[in-house]
Image: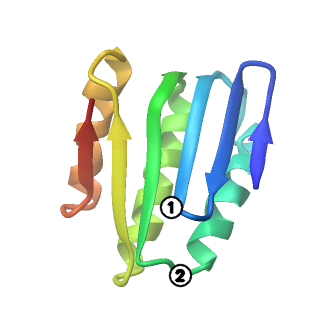
Amino acid sequence: MEVKGNNYHIIFYPETITIAFDGTLRLRGMAEYDPIVQLMDDVVAQNPDTITLDLRKLHFLNSSGINILFKFVIKIRDQSSCKLVVQGSEQVPWQKKSLKNLQRLMADVKLEWD
């Protein structure tokens, strides 16, 4: 499963249950994020033990994108059987600031930094 746009690429790796984001996400409004939300929902529907979000190569995410990310974390939190690992880069300014807030939504989310 994958979603591509002019400046971004999102792909699901089933062997590691990892959703990897690459590029810049500046989509206009929630409706344009629907294909990405659908991919993420499809992964959750598989009921894996752990889902990894690899955001290390995602250089920019606008407020609508952060909103879908936060909603995804809430969805995972509400499925008590699923763990969440979020991989970020300390070299990407928005990640250092925003990803720490995920722990407010889901206390046991595991943040991994490179």
Work out whether 11 lies above or below 21.
below
Instruction: Assess disc 1: are there few (<14), some (14-19) or many (≥20) residues with their C-alpha within 10 Å of its C-alpha.
Output: few
Q: Which mark is residue 47?
A: 2
Work out whether 51 lies above or below 100.
below
The quarter of the rendered structure image containing the C terminus is top left
Residue at label 1? 16
Q: Give the image quarter of residue 101.
A: top left
Work out whether 24 lies above or below 48.
above
Q: Amino acid at mark 1?
A: Thr
Residue depicted at 61% across the width and 22% down the height: 23
Colour scheme of this structure image? rainbow
Q: Give the image quarter of residue 22.
A: top right
Question: CA–CA distance between discs 2 and 1?
Answer: 13 Å
Pinpoint residue 87: horizontal percent, then vertical percent.
35, 42
Residue depicted at 72% across the width and 19% down the height: 7
Helix, strand or loop under label 2: loop
Q: Amino acid at mark 2?
A: Asn
Say whether residue 61 is left or right of residue 23: left
Nearer-N-terminus badge (2/1): 1
